[in-house]
Image (spheres, rainbow, N blue to C red):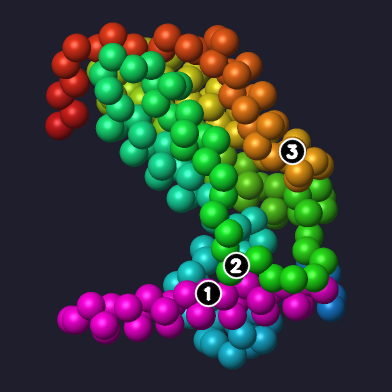
Amino acid sequence: MTEHTLGLRETKKRRTRQALIDAAMRLYREKGLDGLTVAEIAREADVAPRTFFGYFETKEDVFLGRGDDRLDRLVKAIRERDRRQPILSAIRPALLQEREPRREEPTGRLPDLSELLQHPAFANRLRERWNRWEDLLAVAIAQDVGARPGDPNPRFVAAAITGAIRIAAAAAKEQPKRRKQIAEQVFELLASGLAGYGAGLQEPPDRD
């Protein structure tokens, strides 16, 4: 398969994903969230329902957006850090990195987080996502520092990091122009308690 073919395939995937997002937002503006189905979104985007599930696991994911790119950056920063550097210092750039502009942001009125959380399905899905983040970060941290089985510290640090991200995201929704300042403020508070965790390791532990 050539680079050109791969490029065309990626372009087609982005367009299909975008068509699904735009279709969901149009239907939301027309009828709200109640009763909106995957079949309706797929039909509005002119694709089969099975195509929808190639891009999103659930209807809720269309509205909640993608967060795994940030999780990937955090895990990568942990694994590639200088062993003498505290974990929190290593992930700071990834935590504070401004979100890159996406085409995946349709114009018009969109549901905000507070509106989404009034619906149990959305609240549950968001909770699942945060729990998954915490699990994956805890594993990455435990592997990185060579934690012994049963050591609660990696889980505690992962929970603190994900909690800080959640708080910063919620506050930034209320004050979008202060997004960066809010993130820095929350990070500084987090750093005051976890500043030295993971620092001073001489050799990376066996991760096999």
Q: Which mark is residue 196?
A: none
Q: For the residues marked 1 and 3, what is the alpha-carbon distance in whole angstroms?
A: 30 Å
Q: Nearer the viewer, mark 1 or mark 2?
A: 2
Residue 9 falls within the magenta-colored stretch:
yes
Q: What secondary structure characterizes most of the magenta part?
A: helix
The residue that mark 3 highlights is: 178
Q: How far apart are marks 1 and 2 (CA)?
A: 8 Å
Instruction: Single out the mark in the foreground, 3 or 2.
Output: 3
Quarter of the image for the N terminus: give it: bottom left
Residue at the (27%, 84%) spot, across then down? 5
Q: In this view, does 5 lie above or below 195?
A: below
Q: Residue 93: x, y in percent? A: 47, 34
Write the residue at 63% across / 47% down: 126
The answer to whether 119 appears left or right of 10 in the picture is right
Q: Mark 2 points at which residue?
A: 104
Asked if residue 100 is positioned above or below residue 194 in the image, the reply reads below
Label number found at residue 17: 1
Give the mark, 1 or 2, whose residue is nearer the N terminus: 1
Q: Of the residues shown, which amino acid type is indicated by label 1?
A: Arg
Distance between mark 3 and mark 2 Cα atoms: 22 Å
- Per the image, label 2 sits on a secondary structure element best described as loop
Bounds of the magenta segment: 1-29
> Which comes before the other along the chain, label 1 or label 3?
1
Amino acid type at image mark 2 = Glu
Q: Badge 2 local density, few (<14 within 10 Å), some, or many (20+)?
A: some
SS state under label 1: helix
Toward the viewer: 136 or 193?
A: 193
Q: Position of residue 74 (x, y in %)?
A: 42, 37
User: Is there CB contact under 8 Å for labels 1 and 2?
Assistant: yes
- Position of the C terminus, as image quadrant, is top left
